[in-house]
Image: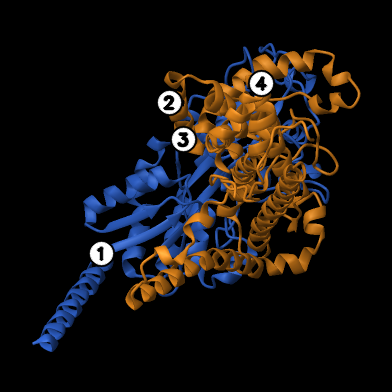
Chain colours: A orange, B blue
Amino acid sequence: MADRAPTVPLTTAPLPTVPLPAQSVSKSTSKPSSIPPASSLARFGDKIYGAVIFLASLSIFGIILWLFWQLTGASLPSIRHFGLSFVTGSEWDEVSSSYHVLPYIFGTLFSSAIALLLAVPVSIGAAIFLSELAPRWIRTPATFLIELLAAIPSVVYGLWGIFILIPFMKQFIVTPIVGSRLPHLPIIGELFKGQSAGYSMLAAGMILAIMVTPFITAVTRDILRAIPRSQREGSYALGATKWETISQVVIPYAKSGIIGAVILGLGRALGETMAVTMLIGNQPPNTPNGISLSVFQPGYTLASALANKFSEASPGLSTSALVEVGLVLFGVTIVVNGAARLLVFYTAKDVQGGK
Amino acid sequence: MHKSFTQTWKGAVLAALGLTLLGGASAQAQQINGAGATFPAPLYLKWFQEYKNATGAQVNYQAIGSGGGIKNITAHAVDFGASDAPMNAAEMAAAPGILHIPTVAGAVVVAYNVPGVGPGIHLTPAIIADIFLGKITKWNDSQITRLSPGIKFPSTSIFPVHRSDGSGTTNIFTTYLSEVSSEWGGADGPKSGKSVRWPNGLGGKGNAGVAQLIKQNEGGIGYIELSYAVTNVISYAAIRNAKGKFIYPSVNNTSDAAEGVTLPADFRKVITNTSSVTGYPITGFTFLLVYKNGTRPEVKKLLQWCLTTGQAGAAAQQYAPLPPSVKRRALAAVASMR
């Protein structure tokens, strides 16, 4: 570790805020004698200001608790009726009032995983290029375009998916793979089993990847731009090449911030509704537990189940079960985000430990 | 001075508030509010425009879906609800005194996209059930080909398509399948409802979503409203009815179908598998939902207009007018409202 370029301890905050290292900025200015004594009115103003921003931060907790409370309250009949089998069972049948969501949970996680697998390398690569390598005449328009991509409504992505992505996928991805030896290979073959109409986990994952790429790219780029020049200059001064500087100084320095950017993208992928509903096929795969590892099979996500079923749900257990779907999505988001935060926590510690 | 200013200000606000309330009340007296089914919405909007021209009464209709219509009328939030599927027992219990008034009938067609095959192939109820159960998987299956001798079917795989959202259309289609197939309606079958446990295939949102999936997939087959299939030029099948005749769906044989079934007193029935020789077997009424007691007289007048004058314009928009026998009974039900 000693030969590694020097790194500065990072804050654990993974948010898109600039992760400025806790440098000794405050020490030089903290001498109270240099500040003129404040009038009592100004101090009172400070207190009010403090109270207002405290309330503002408290309101976030309040809203989350309130949401959780309401969702739990409205799904109580369903929770009482199905218990844990709600999340471990596979059958959703409105005719016999039997509601279970395992295929939806799986679909949510699986489509988001495909999305991140496709989006993360592209996003981080693009961000590094824009921040470290690109000349100004590319950087400015490219940054503008990425921000534009992030602003497109999801229903537009969905329509684009139906008319462009699905036909393209069928012709250039599904048909060649189905005709090849790939589906017959052990283990990997499981991912490509079955015939496909194009509407599938893969289509949903691909559209999600396209949707989260601008988010991850924009945030990662901002984080890379915020790394002090001195870090790079120090590295070059030691004789490092551009590649060495990027891979051994810039990336480790920004690691926790980049993971934070990925979490932001993951959050969007987990909850995305419209585009996924339009492309995923809205049918659990025809297997005993409604789960298939094949990316060519159609699927269902928690969010698309809500979008499809809520408007026509009859009162009583059916509505209650759908609210519980919302509660489960809430839970899945919290668990996945929590796990990602832990990851950030440990990686940040690792960087510090390298000192 | 200060005080009098406050009082004047208060007075002004109260006066303004009073005016708004009064204005709101008088506007509401003429205005009728309804919400519900999307399937008959184009017809309803045309009807209510004509009704406004004829009587001056303003009718607001929001096409938010049958489920939304039932929820709104149950909560007394609208003057009338609209639904394609009759309300089930739980929904009826939540809204005591609700009446189902049929307005028009619609046909659900079995649409398909088979390369080189035009409209009007012949299908039997058993074949349709087996296709959606996943038991017939190729278009050149002998069970299909022998019914349409003049047509050459390719060996394309069959892709069944269904609605992913809850829908009155699904209710009509699955009620029909439950009636004609013991496996579909049996203990382990998907049975009937606005949303069922489909054994396979793909789900599309709305008539448009299903039509898109059929168009995009060679070998696709699904069920959509007749009016939707006609306006979007999608091929659909002639289906063998209970009397053994293959019927190519149209507005006329949808009305015929409505005459060939025995309706319960409250009209809560899907008119599938009609005994009429010329009737198409997969049809259903769409309903307006009103309370027997306490509904405003303006609404009653509107319903009477829909069942009489309104019927004439329905066929032009691919909705089947009520047959005379049903129309008479629907008018009697409206007359019973107080």
**Residue A86: percent from left, percent from top:** 78, 58
> Are marks 2 and 3 in one subunit?
yes
Q: Which mark is in front, 3 or 4? A: 4
Q: Quick one: SS at disc 3?
A: loop
Chain for numbered disc 4: A
In this rendering, is residue B44 above or below B302?
Answer: above
Image quarter where the N terminus of chain B lies is bottom left
Query: Furthest-left residue in view?
Result: B1
Which residue: 85% across, 28% down?
A190
Q: Which mark is in front, 3 or 1? A: 3
Alpha carbon distance from label 2 to label 1: 58 Å
Q: Quick one: SS at disc 2?
A: helix
Which of the two discs, 3 and 4, labels the residue nearer the N terminus? 3
Residue B178 visible in the snapshot: no
| Residue type beneath disc 4 | Gly
Pointer 4 residue? A239
Residue neighbourhood size for the residue with mark 4, other residues' Cα within 10 Å, grouped as few (<14), some (14–19), many (≥20): few
Pointer 1 residue? B30
Which of the two discs, 2 and 4, labels the residue nearer the N terminus? 2
Number of the label disc, if any, that sits on residue A140: 2
| Cβ atoms under marks 2 and 1 closer than 8 Å | no
Which of the two discs, 2 and 3, labels the residue nearer the N terminus? 2
Q: Quick one: SS at disc 4?
A: loop
